[in-house]
Structures are given as C-alpha cells and as structure tokens.
Amino acid sequence: MASGWQASGWEEVATADDLGQALEALQTDAERRLGVVTSAEEVEQLRDRDLAVVVDESVPIGAILDAVGAGGAPLLAGLELFDRYRGEQLGAGKVSYALRLRFQPQAPTDDPDEVLANIRRALAERLAASFRQR
C-alpha cells in the first residue's frame, strides 16, 4: 500500500502512484482559489524577499501593511509577518517587524529588488521607518 497525503481543503488525495494527477488538481484548485499562479513555470518565477522594518511602537501593523501594498503594486503577490522584536539595540519605543514578501514578476524585465526599493521608500516616507539587516 502506497503512503498518501491530503491537503486540507482539497478533495484530491494523492499517493506516490498518482502524484502527477494530484499536482495538476492542486494547481487547478490554486488557480480557482487565488487567481495568481497558473502554471509550474509561474511558480518558478515567484521571488521571496525578507525585510526587517523598524518603526515606533505606536505605528499600527495595518499602516505597515498598507505602505508595503502601495509600494509593492502590482508585483507583490503575498506578504507574511513572521517575527516581531523589541530590544535595547533598537532604541526605546521602537519595534521591528520581519516580513516575507513574495513577488510575482509579470514580465521578464520586472525586478523584485526594484520593487523592494519602492516598498522601503514608501515605508520610510509614510512611517519614518528604518531597516535592520537580517
């Protein structure tokens, strides 16, 4: 008996014998649910970048996300907050948020690093943010 897995929310169950069909089913479902990634080639084009943003503790996370969205359009395909840090090295009243940004280039000339620079600029201008090296 082959071992199998089931992705939560998907009706398809795959075994080692029908992995190709399962991947096709997952891709189709992802297209329907997200409308972002439509082929294996596009998955390979996704680019992740991490960014550590330092702001005053009084700045709401929603303001950070708004600035990131404005600076990242239209290539920003996803965003994940994965860490929050407070410490003496940041200074009193400061907090650092670590974000993972996922970019989906829409043309061969699209440069995620250029968009990341736009995001940094938007955060600095709107929220007086600074950035930590990770």
Image: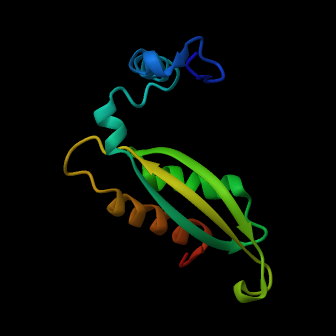
Quadrant into which the C terminus falls: bottom right
Which residue extends farthest left?
108
For residue 72, above or below residue 1 = below
Q: Position of residue 47 (x, y in %)?
A: 39, 51
For residue 11, above or below residue 77 = above
Quick check: can you spot residue 22? Answer: no
Q: Position of residue 2 (x, y in %)?
A: 55, 19
Left or right position of 14 against 42? right
Quadrant in which residue 7 is drawn: top right
Which residue extends farthest front?
1
Left or right position of 44 against 25? left
Q: Position of residue 107 (x, y in %)?
A: 22, 43
Question: How many labels were placed on the picture?
Answer: 0
Identify which residue, 109 or 24, lies in the foreground.
Answer: 24
For residue 120, above or below residue 60 = below
Quadrant in which residue 53 is drawn: bottom right
Left or right position of 16 against 10? left
Q: Residue drawn at (33%, 42%), measured in percent from left and top?
A: 44
